[in-house]
Amino acid sequence: MNSFIGKIKDAFQGNDDFFCKKQIICGESVFVIGLDSLVELDKTLGELKEYKEIEEIEQHGEELADIETAKTSLLEGKLLLARTSKDLAISLVPAPVSLNRSIESSSNENVVLGSAISFNEDIKLNIGLVRKNLKSQNLKVKTYEIGKQYKKEIALLYNQETVHSELLSKIQGQITKFLNQAELECIQDAYKMLGLKKWSFVTQINTTEIPDEALRAIRKGRVVLFIDRLSLALILPGVLRDMIFLYNDHNYPYPLMLSVRLLRIMGILLALIIPGLYVALVAVNPEVLRIEIALSVAQSREGVPYPAIIEILIMLLILELILEASIRLPSSIGPTITMVGGIILGQAVVEAKLVSNLLIIILAAATIANSTVVGFQNSISIRIFKYLIVFLASLYGILGILVGLFIICTYLASIETFGIPYLHFNLNKGEKSSG
């Protein structure tokens, strides 16, 4: 046994899935080396024994003389073929162990009309889904390996005819600087890699499981980023339209499409304004209401010991806990428990005179309106912004709501991602980059 094989065995000592077996292939004695958790050995050996000469097999592989390259090749799922007479190995693509789930429908994004398939954890399959649906020579794929100790493959997809060259060069420059700096495990690491703001209240990377949404983004001049073992497409840059528009909307007749999008805009405004409006009209500006409505509101709050701001903050906190619990509980019992818990809790706090009937209605309407926003991350942003408006409304009433909306609009207008304003709507090459 030569020193090359010995060094590989030493490197993988203690791994029970490592194998280094002596086999007779094409009449010659060779060592086959690999990881049986990644390689179907019996099937691969059957394919190799169909060759007549060992030289034919070597022509289909890659010659490796460096031990570090050989170790990396093994970890990528390759099979090494080593002769005792040579201090090197041949890297071959074996029959792999299937470690990927099949293409399934999306579990987090519902599609009413349109393709139901979704991305999964295999980066090559995800790229293939885009290639299959966007048959154009202008579609370009650029791959990188990120990380020091744990390598992670990523891929950039873009249309060279529609993408802004400045946007593309900035993204590629950030990735190149990050190549050997740290590991890439989650979307927060992607933010760090791309040099985006860590404390942004809105997502600067739009995420989707639906191939149609990624295809639409590529056609419109945006860049799609895939990370291996992450079943999402990251669309760069994230803009305000991602909260409102879906490519799937185009499957409706035009008037219906406009109506659906108008409903989403109304949902965003209602989710932001309604809780603050309750506090403003109850605690600061009751004179705005007609006398009949003011008396009805006062009667509903009769016996409630807390001021309106404390009352609504308590219920908002409980509602946030219910929403989080609905995500963490098993899907078979989660909806039932949260629905029953919400109904019983709401009825109990009203009967105990801790909150008013009107507040329960307000919070239910705000929660339903918040759910019309496209994307779970975007809905969380709306949930955070509404607290700002509630606090300002408790201090300044109706004026506080207007100030809160102004602050939010100013904040959104100040956000830029790779030089593209967050309020920008059209990223096609040649279009102005203003919002």
Image (spheres, rainbow, N blue to C red):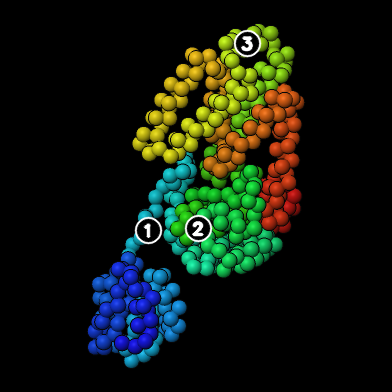
At a point 73% along the width and 37% down the height, the residue shown is 407
Tag shown at residue 196: none
372 in relation to 304, above or below: below
Badge 2 element: loop
Q: Give residue 291's quadrant in the image.
A: top right
Q: Is residue 85 above or below residue 309?
A: below
* Labelled disc at residue 100: 1
Residue at mark 3: 298
Towards the viewer: 170 or 126: 170
Q: Name the residue under label 2.
A: 185
Mark 1 or mark 3, whichever is nearer to me: 3
Residues 265 and 155: in front is: 155
> Residues under labels 2 and 3: Cα distance?
53 Å
Give me the residue at 60% from left, 18% from top: 306
Name the N-terminal-most of marks 1 and 2: 1
Horizontal and vertical percent position of residue 48: 29, 79
Q: Is residue 269 visible?
A: no
**In this rendering, would 423 be left or right of 337?**
right
